[in-house]
């Protein structure tokens, strides 16, 4: 397997988790660059070209609110999770926990798919019709 394939699949795996991470992290007000650092320090690096459009989208969906802080030398836009964002974060976190259990079961071989039985109920030979001599 190439590094490119691995990187692409890791990116796909992480893509859906960034929304939950942002909504959870922004229960406390913060600005974009600080959020990038915070998530990176936690071991979840996010590219700025991913984060800033996401913050704008979440704000447009009214899951985040923002305000400019112009009191410091450099103005910064601070984001905070709204009540709707907090509710969504809880739904996403609950499902994440459920999926985590499923994936743990699969990756530790505790769960195995059902094997097809050659004489399953869907097999024509398993349910011969009256008069069939098969």
Image: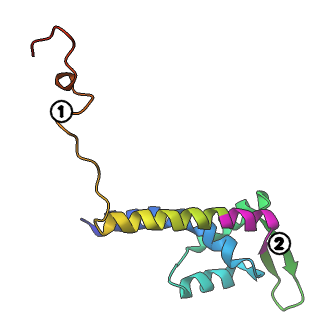
Q: Position of residue 63 (x, y in %)?
A: 76, 63
| Residue 77 forms part of the magenta stretch | no
Q: Identify the residue shown where x is 38% and y is 69%.
A: 104
Mark 2 → mark 1, Cα distance in angstroms: 62 Å
The mark that comes first in sequence, 2 or 1, is 2
Kindly identify which residue carries mark 1: 119
Confirm whether residue 4 shows in the render.
no
Q: Position of residue 26 (x, y in %)?
A: 72, 77
Q: Position of residue 118 (x, y in %)?
A: 16, 35
Neighbours of disc 2 within 10 Å: few (<14), some (14-19), many (20+): some
- Residue 112 lies, with reference to residue 51, above or below; the image says above
Q: Identify the residue shown where x is 16% and y is 8%.
A: 131
Q: Residue farthest to the bottom?
A: 73
Mark 2–mark 1 CB contact (< 8 Å): no
Location of residue 42 (image quadrant)? bottom right
Q: Identify the residue shown where x is 26% and y is 30%.
A: 121
Neighbours of disc 1 within 10 Å: few (<14), some (14-19), many (20+): few
Q: On residue 21, which mark appears?
A: none
Q: On residue 66, which mark appears?
A: 2
- Residue 87 lies, with reference to residue 132, above or below; the image says below
The residue lying toward the viewer, choosing from 125 and 99, is 125
Q: Position of residue 112 (x, y in %)?
A: 28, 56
Confirm whether residue 3 shows in the render.
yes
Q: Residue farthest to the front?
A: 130
Give the left or right position of residue 118, taking residue 98 as reference. left
Which corner quadrant holds the C terminus?
A: top left
Q: Residue farthest to the right?
A: 71
| Residue 85 forms part of the magenta stretch | yes
Q: Main secondary structure of the magenta part?
A: helix
Location of residue 8 (image quadrant)? bottom left
Q: Which residues are magenta?
A: 80-90
Which SS class for mark 1? loop
């Amino acid at each position: 397997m190439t590094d490119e394939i691995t990187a692409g699949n890791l990116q796909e795996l992480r893509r859906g988790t960034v929304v939950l991470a942002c909504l959870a992290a922004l229960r406390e007000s913060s600005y974009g660059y600080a959020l990038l650092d915070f998530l990176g320090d936690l071991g979840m690096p996010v590219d700025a070209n991913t984060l800033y459009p996401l913050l704008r989208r979440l704000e447009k969906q009214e899951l985040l609110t923002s305000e400019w802080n112009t009191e410091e030398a450099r103005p910064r836009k601070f984001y905070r999770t709204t009540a709707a964002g907090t509710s969504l974060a809880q739904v996403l976190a609950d499902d994440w926990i459920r999926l985590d259990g499923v994936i743990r079961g699969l990756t530790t071989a505790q769960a195995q798919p059902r094997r097809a039985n050659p004489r399953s109920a869907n097999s024509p030979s398993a349910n011969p019709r009256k008069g069939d001599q098969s």
